[in-house]
Amino acid sequence: MTAVALQVDDLHKRFDAVTAAEGISVTVPEGVVWSLIGSNGAGKTTFVNMVTGYIKPDRGRIQFHGSDITALTPREITRLGMRRSFQIPQLCAELTVLENMLVSCAINQDRKPSFWHPATSKDDVDKAMEILARFRIAESSNHRMAELSGGARKLLDIAMALYGNPKVMLLDEPTSGVAAEEKFPIMDRVMEALSKENVTTLFVEHDMDIVTRYSDRVLAFYDGRIIANDSPDEVLGDEDVQRYVTGTVT
Amino acid sequence: MSFLKSLPSRSLILFCILVGLGFAMPTWGVFLVTIAFAKGLVALGNVAMMRGGLVSFGQGLYYCTGAYVAGFMAIHLGFSDIFLLCLAGVFVSTIVGAILGPILSTYRGIFFAMLSLAVSMILYGALSKATALGSTDGLTLPGPTFLGFAPEGRALSLHLYIFTVTLVVAAGTLMRMLFDSERGLITLAIKDNELRVEYLGASVRATMSVNFVIAAALGGLGGVIAGLAIGHVDPEYAYWTTSGEFVFVAILAGHFSVGAIFIASVILELVRSFSSLYFPNTWQLALGLFLLLVILLLPDGLGSLMKRWSRATAAFTKKRI
Amino acid sequence: MDLLAVILVDGLIYGAWLFIVSVGLTLVFGVLNVLNIAHGSLYAIGAYTTASAVGLYFAQGGDSFPLGSYAVMVLAAAVVAVVVGPILERGLLRYFYGRGEVVIVLVTYGVFLILEDVMKLVWGVDPYFVSQPYALLGNIEFGPLIYVAYDFLVIAMAIAVGLLVWFVLNRTRKGKIVLAVIHDREMSETMGVNVRRVFVVSFSAGVFLAALGGAITAPMISVTPGLGVSVIITAFAVVIIGGLGSIEGAAIGAVLVGIARAASVHLMPEAELFIIYLVMAVVLLFRPEGLFQKIQARKI
């Protein structure tokens, strides 16, 4: 009986006239890789935002490895071990790739960030470079965000979130804005890093090839509700999903 | 060779040079640099916060607090020892900063600037009507003593100068270490993307509150020294244009080099002194134009020039080896 | 009861003045996203220009039609707007758009420093007195109290300005275009709006309102250097209280601050100099972006 990584019960959220979530309930076991699909406005990103504390649900409960996190802030949820990456990579534009990584390392190391220990000490730089190398963006270590490709920015965004051994990882559209030929290589690297640490992974995606190739299960969103929760083949073959999400019904 | 490059040894060399300069300069020069360095300390506090994206238009609050604490203690309590006055000024300013920091650190951009300005103007207004503290006339401070020793004339100026130089080199070195530290890098990250920093697990509010309190302490220290050097404190220390000057110096210097802050402060004092002597109706014009030029051409301040220069020298020496 | 009435009247008079002085600042921020520290200098230039113009008017035989001096005052403000507005906006500010709100604030701080000395060079450092327009309308008696009628003209002027701005923005086609630019500059541009022209016109309107504030104040005081320095932060406080970019906010903020200051003058004079900042601090503590906040779009 595997432990439950994330337990969501009856989430509701309305923004004035828009229903972003209506009765969302799902049980995510430890160690799985699931994907979330749905057209724009279906409620996928709102779900991610609520689960990571950026938005508070109107009703409902979210539990992370048994503890109630519904009222916690993003920072507290991060410290508990749930991390996320962003649809639009959230990087520090004036800092180099290496410095971005060093920030993540400084915050997520075992001791509290120091008032005097240099941020660019040899040990810290080596550690950061090692992670950058694992994601194969080490050559760009001295570049700033403006000089990176979409794929490299996504990888850095994910690498920063990954540092510190998270238990649950939420990836918001990891391959959007990435050139077609880069999509698989990027997902390969990311999934390799995540599976090594047995991280429970949820990713939001629009590309069904990515969905079928990398996820064990698919959650389909429509109009704030989950309309399907099954294996990729089952979900993509479902009539409602085809009508409302993939647009392949005849 | 690497010993000479380390920060403590560079600071020591700088200290010796500055002290030597003091003996070589005429008394008006010593006085000018002392004031410039005192104000530079306040601007250093501004830079500490600007690295996190917050521009405070109210550092005059701490500058004024420090100065008035020193004045009050010297006149009404009879304490004249400079070490004691500095400790008291810094202590009170730090308390004020510690109270205001957590509240103000939740504000951003224009609102932070205006709120910090508002608090400083409240002190200005209150002091202007406080007859016990001299109202708008302020207080006249006696010359400080140095652990029992009471110099006068040029000797007093030199004592004050060397005391200030010691504080500036020490504070500058410590702040340089802070800026290069892990917390310093996190502060820079906050300026670019607060949300990300929160999502990485650090508290933006806690980090900026610490920067805020440090800036308050530096402001208070600068105020004590300026008050003692000028010999007079008045509510103008908390007026928004005074705070504006500290912002001016911080912008001029940029956040890459601590030394640039004090150089910029000296430049400002030189321009002000000579202009009010020879061009009393155009010195603000000159400053304004200067500021516009800096914003246009050197958006990262004078310090960025020094950074480029040191990078170029490093690249050059690398090539040679 | 009497004291309350006095505080209300004093508060409304001061509030009316505050509104005229501040509305231009909030308008410019709303349209261009520029927080103009030089606003106080523009107010001062308005005062000086009016002092010169009215002085000239009466020297050239204006005594035969003294009420004409009021028209001269408005005209002086208009001249300042038409001359200074485009020079500042097209000639300087536009090179710094897109570098962030704070950079623009620093640029306007530089402009403030420059204009302070420009005024000294043009008008000298001696004070100017043009009190004829102030005394022209005589006095009004409220029981035992005597008020100068001109002060009530200021109230009428504030209401007129408020209504005019509201009308232009909400009921004219050009005004609605300005509102569109306030709400979403990029979208307006893609819909074919000449945003550059909207910027110049709006900024000049802001200059006019600042100069108008100075114009109506000139007869009440002696016009000296440094006039604008305290006005800037007073206007800021009102605009912050009301919410940056909100005209209604500026009106309510002005009345709030006016009454607070009047109350302070009569009840607690020690607080007179800082009551406005206290009100601002309190408002910001409860409404971090002022009374009328702009709606924020989703960030992530």
Image (cartoon, coloured by chain):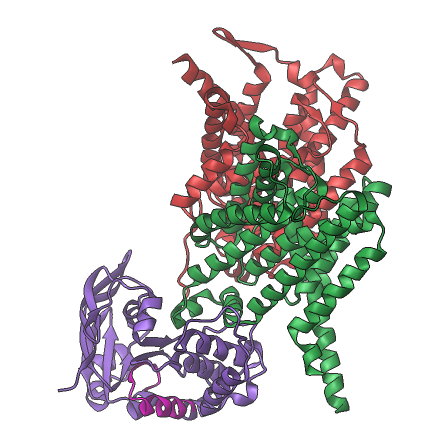
Chain colours: A purple, B green, C red
Q: Is residue B137 left or right of residue C165?
A: right
Quadrant containing the N terminus of chain C is: top left
Q: Tell me what residue is drawn at x 74 percent, y 31 percent.
A: C49
Outermost residue, front side: B148
Q: Quadrant of residue A70?
A: bottom left
* Residue closer to the observer: A15 or C267: C267
Looking at the image, residue B252 lies above or below residue B229:
below
Q: Which residues are magenta?
A: A186-208
Relative to B211, say whether C77 is above or below. Answer: above
Q: Quadrant of residue A217?
A: bottom left
Does residue A24 show up?
yes
User: Please, which residue is most extreme toward the left here?
Assistant: A1
Q: Is residue C205 visible?
A: no
Residue A112 location (% of width, % of height)? 42, 71
Q: Is residue C294 left or right of residue B91?
A: left
Residue depicted at 73% across the width and 51% down the height: B159
Left or right, A69 with reference to A118:
left
Question: Residue B98: where, in percent of width, then height?
Answer: 46, 51
Residue A116, how many percent across, how many down?
A: 53, 70
Where's the C terminus of chain C, which quadrant?
bottom left
Q: Is residue A207 magenta?
A: yes
Q: Residue at x 58, y 47 (%)?
A: B84
Which of the two residues, A216 or C76, is positioned nearer the viewer here? A216
Figure check: B232 above or below C184: above
Indicate whether residue B137 is drawn in magenta: no
Whole-percent x and y of residue B275?
Answer: 82, 45
